[in-house]
Amino acid sequence: MTTVIEVKNLTKRYRDTVAADDVSFTIEKDTIYGLLGRNGAGKTTVMSILTAQNFATSGEVRVFGEHPYENARVLPRMCFVRESQRYPDDATATHALRMARLFFPRWSQELADRLIADFQLPMKKAIKKLSRGQLSAVGVIIGLASRAEITFFDEPYLGLDAVARQLFYDRLLEDYSEHPRTIILSSHLIDEVSNLLERVIVIDKGRIIMDEETEAVRGRAATIVGDTARVEAFVDGREVIHRESLGRVTSATVLGELTDADRSRLAAEGLDIAPVSLQQLIVRTTQHVESALTAAPEGAL
Amino acid sequence: MNRTWNVVRLQLINKQTYVWVPLIVLAGSFVLTLLIWSMVPFGGQKYSGGAQAVYWYFGVVGVQALTLTFPFSQAMSVTRREYFFGATLTAVLTSALLASIYVGGAFLERATGGWGMEGYFFSIDWIWDAGPAAAWLLYFAVPMLFFMIGFGSATFYKRFGSVGLTVLLVGIGLSLVGLGWLIGRADGWSAVGTWIATQGTAGIAAWTLVVALVVGALSFAPLRRATP
Amino acid sequence: MIEEGRALFLQIAERVEDSILDGSLAEESQAPSTNELAAFYRINPATAAKGIAMLTDKGVLHKRRGIGMFVSPGARELLLGERRAAFADRFLDPLLAEARTLGLSPDDIARLLSERAARTTTEGTAR
């Protein structure tokens, strides 16, 4: 597998916040990545720095083996569509797409036309007069039709309704199947996009807390529900990332795959196993990490 | 170079900003001037400062070139260098167009004896006497300067914020006042006046371009670190 | 259709196995391609490929160069064997656990089993 992006110890500091904290990861060619995390976790900051739209405080970034800053060899091979992209005043969607066609060497007008029809985008209306959903559609179409070797989507589909979002996911997968490229999708709607992702990178408060194959993470946790005493007995010695109790019933989310022996035991004890979706797993893991961090000073004693 | 040329096309996406509005501003101020002149009862030569309206607008265009087009150029994966030269090239082309219109208008004006009213809008004597080429150069240099000032201010603002820009403008203002005071101290105003007169139209145009160039060059550095 | 909390490639593989077992996907016939599966289930092609790879490793599918993936001869028997071995773990253990909770003895279960089995057969023949 070829590495197309290498990030080493990337840190971005603002006056009083750390947006990216010693971030390191690699991106492999022709793979769909999910860059997941809460709002303000640092996703946009990282993607901006990778595309040289923003600058690191320290650390190293290599795209196609080179530094992306002011690099006309590397930059046109990437496309970064922001969540709130600004367009020239009075420009229409026609203008924006015509421009994109000029700047992206692998642009597909056929795909763009198809998407315009799919999203029913008004082409002659000024972009500043478009609805939130239509504005997002412009960004989505640019990102998809650019066929850029590395395409970033920074939650550009937020303004789209559920039907339009599904359309985006479908078209994305379709085009990726026929014309593979490296795609990095940032989102906080994890369950919606999880099926598209080959790898997930989870970022929280500027730090990477997970960087794995999606399939390996799925099924990594299970929620055991039932009588409190029995549940506690079962989860003893395992890593519990979430616990809730109501009366004598406890629901505990544990990490670690359940073996057949585990399942038999649970069945015998009359305990239920509830599946844990990727989103739940990531949310619980994030909360777990955050509370561990705040508890650290005490634990250190 | 191809990508830089595409930046020019990017700036010109919307013909309104660089072509139509300046023409409308020009046409508007011209017509207004003619109307005023036709209402004025006295004979003799009449002059108008209406020709400068467009120049102020070019300052605005310079600002908008950065605020509205720069963020989109970043999304188009354009480097800041390509963007800077593309925006400058656009200003050169549109300023040249404007200068040509002015010179064309001046010829017409002289031929019609000041539009039949001895009114001089395009061809002010001291400019026109030096010849159409020098006039063209001046009519080219002035909008370029205004554009660069607008562009430079906006770039500085983007990089250093409103405090930074204010400090810069105040600094420039104080420097100019200081310079004026020094000249006054040395009783040099008449010398300055003579010098300006000896420059002639072409000379002033050249100096204006030099200032525009300097402003442009100084705005490149902050642009290199600007974020969309 | 797709279960939460379980690897997708396993589920995809199981679906293909199901269709082999129930006869809708015959031996020596062409199996759905990675892209077809990905499009149908709306998942990443790499995930679908992982499922296909697993089935290939098991010997259920094989590749015919230039054409695609085909169901291997003997695949059905192989899968039957696998599923039968897992039957008791998958279905009987939970059944027994629930029966215990309800206070049903193995004899009770046996009786219920015969009754239900008879009913299904008559319904089947009646249709």
Image: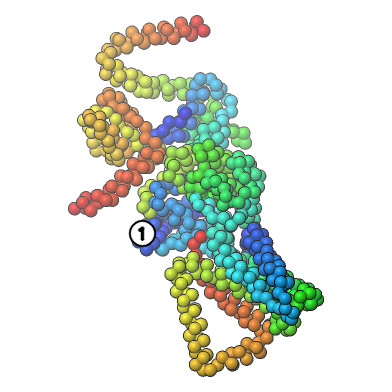
Q: How is the image coloured?
A: rainbow
Numbered marks: total: 1
Where in the figure is residue B8, as x and y percent of width and height? 64, 63
Residue found 30% across the figure and 24% down from its top: A267
Side of C31 relative to A280 (left or right): right
Is C27 above or below relative to B48?
A: above
Residue found 59% across the figure and 41% down from its top: A119
Taking the view exactly as shown, the residue that stands out farthest to the bottom is B187
Which chain's residue wears label 1?
Answer: A
When asked about the image quadrant of residue B98, the answer is bottom right
Is C88 above or below relative to A274?
A: above
Where in the figure is residue C95, as x and y percent of width and height? 33, 18
When asked about the image quadrant of residue B89, the answer is bottom right
Q: Could one spot residue A293 in this view of the protein?
A: yes
Side of B131 relative to A14 (left or right): right
Amino acid tagged 1: Thr
| The one of A144 and C64 positioned closer to us in this rendering | A144
Label 1 environment density (alpha carbons within 10 Å; few <14, some 14–19, many ≥20) = few
Is A296 above or below relative to B176?
A: above
Residue found 24% across the figure and 38% down from its top: A237
Where in the figure is residue A5, as x and y percent of width and height? 49, 54
| Mark 1 element type | loop
